[in-house]
Structures are given as structure tokens and as C-alpha cells.
Amino acid sequence: MSGGQHWMLPFLPYGAELLHAESQPKQAHLQFINLDQDEFKEVIGVYRLNQELYLFVLNNFHGHWHLISLIKGKGYQVSYLGTAHITSRNRLNLVVGWQVGSIWSSLSIYEWQNNGLKELDLKGDFSFSKIEIEDMPGRNGKDGLAEIALWSHDTGEAYRVRVYRWEKDRLVSAKDVEPYYFQKVVKYYQQKIKEHPDYLFYYPYLEEAEKKASQRSFDFTESRAIPLFPASIKEIGGSKWGYINSKGKFLLPPIYDQAEDFQENGLAIVRLTDHAGIIDTDGHFIVQPKYDDITSYSDGRAIANDLQGFKVIDERGKEITAMAHYSISEFKEGRARFADKNQQGEYLHGYLNRKGKEIIPASYEDASDFSEGKAIVKIKNGSYALIDLTGKVLHSYMYAFVGNYGEGLLAFKKNKDGKFGYLDEQGNVVIKPQFSEAEAFSQGRAIVNVSDDYSNHYGVMNRKGQFLIKPEHDQIFYLGEERYQIGKAINPEQPYLGTKYAVADVEGHLITGFIYSDITKYKDGIVSVTNDQSTFFIDRNGNRVHRMPQVSGRGTLEKDKTLIMADVDYRLLYFYKKGELVWEQNTVIPLKKHYAVIEHKYKPNKDYLVYFPQIQGGALEHVNQTLKDLSGVKEIPPHTQLDSSYIGDFEVSFFKKNLLVIEINGYDYPFGSAHGISIKKYAHINLKTGAFYQLKDLFKPEAAYVKIISELIRDQIKNNKNYSYLNVNEYKDIQPNQSFFISEGGLNIYYAQYEIAAYAAGMPTFTFPFEELSGIINQNGDFWKSFH
């Protein structure tokens, strides 16, 4: 603290650190302004205590300073602290940017109310990378109220820019001032293109800025009916998701960790900081990201779960269940199955209505979804019953199993180890037991399996038990529009190696050969198929639809009203219906000056796919070869059936000064296994020297880092509930070359699957702030200096 600020010491708790502006390290983040409209100015600042931030206000009464407001902040630093007339021309607002990530800040706006600061509810997520606040001229010039321009990082030094103003009770888009402000944005991108003419990704940003800067009309209202599509940008720190329009332009900036499709009700599920929330088409959160998961809406209701359990959410984002339940299924015909534990510790099932009320109490051992106004439930005495929407028992059945209701017929078993047959609703045996599997009837047909062993013999039969498609297939799925997907093993002696599929009609006549790896469901007379080389559409006659796109690789195509989404080889693309590419994920991640990370694809075999990084700029040939080797780029026979499948990918997880950290991950699945093995490696590269760093390079030569870090991990296992799944008595010391990675938060030590925990535990990771290891870190070493 500078000499002129020592008078503040009595107001700061012991150990508190007054935060300073990054651009002026010796100048504290302080504001001297008159918030409460009296004759004295208040002093506003932020301090850090025990890794928490606090915003404080001091006021002068009769020559003495007093602490009059203290608010807990967010993140780990302050990127912006300023004042402006935002909500009123007669009173200043305090604006704070809370640094929550290396390039992201969270916006807060405060107003003086009743002798204290109150944070305004912005009714949405307003994360930003850079911010500018000024009274911008609109239709009638300046109006005495400030607008806020938020720059959201996309990739490299490219940003999506949006301008907001306060209206009534929230921030809204300030379209009328865009012609003024985007002149600045145009100049910014013109300069970037001048500096890096080979960085082609800057040009679309310039084009969009020029369009907004040249607009003459001030009627900029965007229709909520504009279709939005999820799209991701690969950048430093991983991939971020936003939403593009049908022209491939981002309307909602890529700030989310994940983003799902917008549903018919205009709502979409997104994830931030490993939690799920719901946004509207303006990007405002109607449900803050606070749940572990949220299902898609069904019957106007979504199901969310957190540590308390499962809850029902309506389309306004309100929880409508009075309590959390052990489980809730999605709504079908106005009912949702739920389960709770009774006093005896048994889980019983019941049904909720659309108001979240228990319309049928939890009293059944098991229950199905409603179909055609009826459901099958298992009574506690072991019998089964067919009930209606009110819970009234229509019929009862004394069999070992009854279920899969459809079109008045039910699959049943006479005894636990017996075969399946079919009953009518009255309990009469319609088709005698003879099947190892029996699905529900639909459109007068049912898929059954007649196998007596572990092989499969699927067929399709009518209500009389007569086979329309002979039971001689490895798999059968109904595709809709009177078409079936029929599968047979690639190698009958080794069925676990996979299946090839054909399309057949309802009589079992083949429309295509057994040539496809994947087939989606028919919609509007077409279906997406993929073979070993490409993905495309075929019609109901099995003919390829030539007027629509064909994409190299394996995946799916989905037709929307305006675009076709291609999810092929683990990458997302969008096309116009005639096949013209609209948008694809970037393959260049700029770093600094002439450095960039370029994504390359290696697919020598249908079951082997690797996306690997190469560094552009400088003499780094040996670095690029090492990255290829680490990624799994090796000689693979092209037309041979492999024993396993492999998918590899990467992320630029960290970059600071000269240190580039690349996360290389993969998943190896041996065919026929219960599960595969996840692979994760980190390459720590000095861009200036080309050196690859190991864990030992971070520490002083004489430091006992293995023992020290191992003891710190033991302490976390003992005292941190997040590691309750680990047994400290079974933990062993780390290895000198232990797997690790550097992040903004510090040093991270991680273990491979099975190394210290069960498979389901994934890769246990332990994080240590650099301050905690300061005694053993070699601050004069090349590794430390590469990012300090």
C-alpha cells in the first residue's frame, strides 16, 4: 500500500490485501465519488482476504471515516471498477468487473439504496473480456445515460461485441447506438488485419462490424423467431459454445461450456462452471446455472436435479414441486413417474401431474410411463396392474412380469426365468410365451427376439403372432414412416466387432444392402445414413438425395427448417439445404505474434480417428513431431478390421508468456469390452526454446517435492469431502515423473483411471496454489520463468 493510503489500514481486516489495477500495479483500485448525494465523497475499494474478495464503502461523518457497506465479491481479481449514470441521470452507479477466469470477467452493477450498496439483478449472464462505458449518441444524440459495451472473447484477439443499456429492470440491447460504437470496432479489426493479414478469421468480424457501423435505420428490433443453432469456438482454455443464426453469425456469444438446441418453447439448456441452466433466445437466464442436470422440456415441464434431488421446472424457470424426489422421469401425457424412499428404506413409485403435485401417491414397487392413458404398475404383493391417469385399477395380473403396454397388448412372463408372450388388457393370453425379448406393439407390429442363447434372432410380427420380418437378424429398430433398420454382424464369429445395417419395409423387403454403420429416424421422407466413408441422406426408396449435402466421415445429419446440422467425426458443421457450407469450427487457435496452434485430422481407418495439434511459427519441427507421437499418430492399416476403436483430440488448456500447455486426450475401446480406457496427457512447451518440461523442472534441485506433494495429497484426501471416495490408507506417494498440468490456479496433479481409485472415479485431480509450494519452486528455473 502506498504512503498516501496508510490511513485506510484500520478499516481493513488483518491479512487483507488491497487490490490494485493491473495496468498500474502501484495504484489501488479506489473510487472517490459521492454515491449518497450528500456533501461528502465516499471511498470505494476492493480487498482480498483468504482468497475471497470484498467490496467496501467508507463514508466520512464529522471528520471521521466509517465502514458503511461491505459486500462479498466474485472471482479472484478486479478487472474494472468505475462509475456511470446507468439507471438514473441523478445518481451514479458503481460498475465492477469481477475477474473469474484468465480472459473472462463477470459484470456487477450497484446502486445506493437505504444507506448501503445494493447489487442490481441483471437478469442474465453478462460475462465479458473487455468493457467500455460511455453515454453514446443514439437516435436523438446523447441522453445523459451511459451504455455498456461488452467485448466477449472468441478466438485469438477476436471478440464479439454487444452494447447494452438499462431499461426498467434489466440490461437490454442498445441497437440504436451501434452505428456510433461499431466505428471503433471497425478500426480495431482493420488494425488486426493490418498486423496479421494471414489470419483469415478476422475478416468475418470486420464484415459484421462494418455492417453495424453503416446501418442508417434505428429500427433494430430482432425477431425472437430468428432460429438459433449451437456452435463452438476452440480457444485457449478449451471450447466455448454460443449460438449462430442461419447465416453462420454468432448472435449469442460463445461463453458457455456446453449448449443444446433451442426447443420449440424458445428455451435452451446450457452449462457454465459444470452446472446446467436455461436461457431464452436473448441469452437471458430464466434458470441460473445451478443444477447438476436439466432434461429437455416435455409437456411444458423440465426435470432438474441437484444435491437435494429431482425437481420439476415450468417454462418460467420456477420450481413447482413442493419437495425434491429421489427420481422423476420426463412427463408423458401429463404425468411423470417419481420415486421416494419410505420408512422401511424401500423405494416406491408414484406419479406427479403438471402442477408438480402427487396425483398418484408413491405406493408401487415399479411403474411405467403412461401410454394411451394407461400405465403398468407393480403392486407390493408382487402382482401387476393396469391403471388409468387417476390411479384407478383397470385390471390386475398375477404373473412374474407384465409390461411394455401398447395398443391393448402387454408383454408378460409366467415365471422369472421364462419366455415372453403377450396378454390382452383382460389378462387373456393372446400370443403364448416363446420370446427372449418382446417390445411394445406399435402400428400393429412388435419387435421380438427368439434367441435361446447369447446370439440374437430379431424379427417383426403382427398381432396374430405371424412374422412379417423373419427372426434372423442381429438387430432391428423401427425408423418411422413404415421403415425398419435391420442389422447383421460384420463377422458372425465375432459379433462384438460391430453391425452393418440395411433399410427394409414393413414386409421385410430390403430397400438397401447391409452397407450402413448408422441410420437415424425418418423425417419428412428422408433419413441420415453413414457408411465407412461419408454421411448423407437417402429417401424412403433407399436412393441418395443428391440435392442435399454429403459429408466425408461418420456421423449424422439433421434437417431443420433453415439449415442442416452435421455431427460428423466428432465435429459440428452447418450447411444450407443444397450443400453449401455455412459454418464450421475453427481449426486455428492464435497465440501471440506469429504463433498459432493448428488442428490436423488423421483418420487412416474407419475405427481410428485423431485430431492432433501442430504449432505454427518458429523452428519447432521437433516439437510438432513429438506432439504427433503423443497424440497417437502412427501407422494404422487402412482397410483392416481393428480389434478396438480409438478417438483422440486436444485442447489448448493454458498459455502465458512463453509457456503453452496442450491437453491431449483419447479413448480406446476394445470391441466387446464393458468399457474403454480414457487417456490424458499434458505437453508443457516453451515456445521460445522448444523445451518440453517435466514435473521435476518446476522445483529446486534439492527439493523433496515427491514427499511434500504426497503429504499434501494425503491431507486433501483426509479433510476434503470431495475426495471421500478415496482411502487414504491405500494411497501411495506420487512418482517423480507424476502426471501434472499447470493452470491459472496453480499446479495440478492427476492420476489415470484405476491408478488410485475405481474406474467410475475417473481421473482424481489435486490442485495446489503456487503460494502453497513457494518454498520448493525454483523461481530462477526455466520452467517457472517461462510463464512468469
Image (spheres, rainbow, N blue to C red):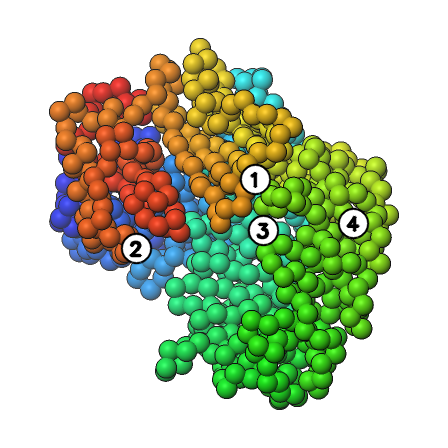
Of badges 2 and 1, the one in the foreground is 2
Circle 4: is it few (<14), some (14-19), or many (20+) Cα within 10 Å? many
Task: Say which residue label 2 marks.
Answer: 725
- Name the secondary structure under disc 2: loop
- Residue assigned mark 4: 503
Reading the image, the residue beneath label 3 is 260
**Sequence-earlier tag: 2 or 3:** 3
Amino acid at circle 2: Tyr
| Quadrant in which the C terminus appears | top left
Q: How many numbered badges does the structure rendering display? A: 4
Three-letter code, disc 4: Val
State the quadrant of the N terminus. Answer: top left
Q: Which residue is mark 1?
A: 232
Q: Nearer the viewer, residue 49 or 294?
A: 294
- Measure how far apart labels 2 and 3 are at the Cα level: 31 Å
Residue at the far top: name it: 619
Nearest the eye: 558 or 204: 558
Element marked by disc 1: strand
- Spatial CA span between label 1 and label 4: 34 Å
